Structure formats: C-alpha cells, structure tokens
Image: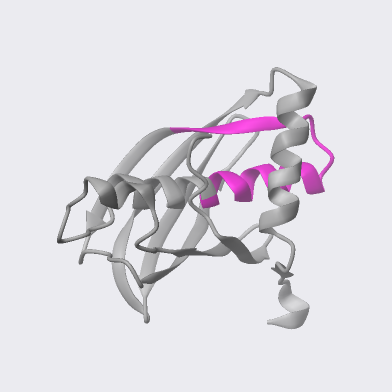
C-alpha cells in the first residue's frame, strides 16, 4: 500500500460498524500538485481512506474469528457523493457501517465528516482474496496492531 490514509481506528462494533480518523495536513505529499496555493484533499483519497477503514473492518473480523487470512479488495464504489471539500487542518471522522458480510464479499455504507457535517458518503463493496504470502499477512497484522492500538471494542453491554 503506497498511502496509509487512516491515522487511527477509534472504535469497532463487530457486526455493525468501525470508526476511524484521518487528519489532513499540509505535509501530505498530494498538496504539491493539488492545488498549489489552494490545497484541496482529493476525493479519490477520501474514498481510499474510507476503503481502507472498511477493509480493516472485514479483516479484523476475520482475525477475531481465526479465519484464514484474506485481503479485502475494493471492487465497487457506489453512490459516492462529496458534499464539501476537505482541506489541511480538517480532521475527518470516518465510519463504515456494515450492510452485507459473507465469506466472499462485504458491503459497507461509509461517511466522512468534519464537526458532524458530512463531507463524503457512499457505499463500498469488497471482495475477499487469499493473501499470497506469510510476509504480507504479517505486515497487515502489524499495521492493524498500530492503527488499533487504542481502539475501543463496543458491544451491547457498553453502548
């Protein structure tokens, strides 16, 4: 993965949703070209951060259930809408709510908000593919250990 576009995973409710954070800073490489003098975070990278969070949800579920490790691959972006631009200094609260999850694919409804105002929303579908190597599998587990270091696990007992 070239870009890690989640700064942290904040909360997970297995079977329901995952929440995370992406802070946009002027130090992000993309602002060299997008756009000099008027930095706007590209919508494609907002989709990528939402996809990374949605994929993380499904992969964390598989790890929790000790299933054979699979990688989530984004296969469909549906009904994605951008309500307002995102800029350096914005801290995106990102969320993926589970719509469908089975052994072959998963679908999430995603939102990116700043100060509870929607910046982007849509639906993402993932297919699950076998991870080809132990090295890649271990790398993904290490990444999730970092991102989920302070993650809160929510269930009906602590809502």
Q: Name the residue located 62 percent from the left edge and 51 percent from the top edge.
A: 57
Give 20 or 61, whichever is nearer the viewer. 20
The total of numbered circles placed on residues is 0
Q: Name the residue located 63 percent from the left edge and 45 percent from the top edge.
A: 58
Q: Name the residue located 75 percent from the left edge and 52 percent from the top edge.
A: 145
Residue 48 at x, y = what percent?
Answer: 41, 45
Q: In the picture provided, is 105 more to the left or to the right than 123? A: right
Q: In the picture provided, is 45 more to the left or to the right than 84? A: right
Residue 69 at x, y = what percent?
Answer: 75, 31
Give 149 or 154, whichever is nearer the viewer. 149
Residue 70 position (above or below residue 151): above
- The colour mode here is one colour
Q: In the picture provided, is 65 more to the left or to the right than 106? A: right
Q: Name the residue located 78 percent from the left edge and 34 percent from the top edge.
A: 138
* Residue 29 counted in the magenta span: no
* Residue 66 counted in the magenta span: yes
Q: Which residues are magenta?
A: 53-74
Residue 84 at x, y = what percent?
Answer: 20, 66
Q: Quadrant of the C terminus?
A: bottom right
């Amino acid at each position: 993965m070239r870009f890690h576009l989640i700064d942290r995973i904040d909360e997970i409710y297995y079977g329901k949703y995952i929440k995370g954070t992406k802070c946009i800073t002027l130090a992000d490489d993309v602002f060299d070209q997008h756009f000099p003098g008027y930095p706007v975070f590209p919508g494609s990278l907002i989709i990528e951060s939402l996809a990374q969070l949605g994929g993380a949800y499904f992969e964390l579920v598989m790890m929790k259930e000790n299933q054979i490790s699979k990688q989530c691959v984004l296969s469909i972006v549906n009904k994605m809408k951008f309500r307002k631009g995102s800029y350096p200094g914005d801290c995106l609260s990102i969320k993926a709510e589970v719509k469908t999850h089975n052994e072959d694919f998963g679908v999430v409804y995603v939102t990116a908000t700043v100060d509870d105002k929607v910046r982007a929303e849509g639906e993402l579908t993932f297919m699950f593919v076998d991870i080809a190597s132990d090295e890649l599998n271990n790398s993904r587990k290490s990444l999730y250990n970092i991102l989920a270091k302070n993650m809160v696990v929510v269930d009906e007992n602590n809502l």
